[in-house]
Image: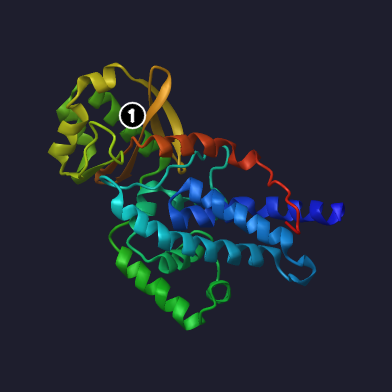
Amino acid sequence: MTSDLDEAVSVFVQHRARLFGIAYRVLGSVAEAEDVVQEVWLRWQKTDRSLVLSPVAFLSSATTRLAINVAQSARVRRETYIGPWLPEPVDTSSDPEVGAQRAEALELALLLVLEKLSPAERAVYVLREAFDYTYPEIAEILQLSVVNVRKIVSRSRKRLSGEPRVSVDEVEHRRLLEAFVSAARTGDVASLEAVLAPDAVSLSDGNGVRGVARVPVLGRARVANLATATRRFWQEAELRLVQVNGRTGVMICRDGSPATILTIAASKEGIHRVMWVFNPSKIAAFLDSRSRCATVPALTSVGG
């Protein structure tokens, strides 16, 4: 029995990054993705594994279906969210791809765009675009026909066309981020506008936190003015570079404690999306995500 459970743990840990990656992309929440992965572990532990032909197929299928269920209920909860909602950022410094074959499918701006799709459509898109599952494999996972899966992927791509712009490389991304922060700290509006795209948007996720914009701020001039509106915001802050969803971001700390996570999305036109995470629970989830890969699933009584 001990040997069998050890093998179960070994197989699960081998695929855990992939399972978290699937759940996180569907849900946009570190905490909810972890809950899904833990539930999959419980199911895997209690399953007659001698009957499972492909562990990764079994685990991926269970993860995807659970994530869709959670996403459907999460959509209702978000209707009461105060102000713009952003996906929970995840620290990718120790696990850059979070189990993905295509790391660009992890960027925060793309995850936000995926919210336009239904949970089922999002799951199909994630399996295909982030993890390169074949159409027959996706059909098997979601109990759909191959024809239907192809239609969902095609329809999703059309709905997202024009939204996920071609991102700049990491060197240019970091240059633009540092230029934005430097100009914002010194109140240099002209330099800020120089790195912003004409249709730039600023989104502040605070869920009711005082002083946080509760509506999207649209346009190059308004985004630049917002970033320099409160000089004290920058003067009293300690800044640290962090890895956020595969890209460089900035952790803004006050009195030694993380208070805000700043990330950007940029294309050849410049920074087109500025994302501020003020929500304390999302910042805490980001900090907790650093130890995610080192965590081994806890064994439970199979009969319990």
Question: How many residues crowd mark 1 within 10 Å: few (<14), some (14–19), many (20+)?
Answer: some
Residue at x 54% of width, y 76% of height: 139
Look at the image and tell me whether residue 29 can be seen.
Answer: yes
Q: How many marks?
A: 1
Residue at x 40% of width, y 43% of height: 169
Is 295 positioned to the left or the right of 269 in the image?
Answer: right
Residue 132 location in percent, x, y? Answer: 53, 64
Residue farthest to the front, as pictured: 304
Residue 250 location in percent, x, y? Answer: 38, 30
Amino acid tagged 1:
Glu
Residue farthest to the left, as pictured: 221
For the residue pair 6 and 105, the one nearer the viewer reads as 6
Q: Is residue 119 above or below residue 214?
A: below
Q: Is residue 86 above or below residue 145?
A: above
Residue 62 location in percent, x, y? Answer: 60, 65
Is 225 positioned to the left or the right of 129 in the image?
Answer: left
Tag 1 residue: 178
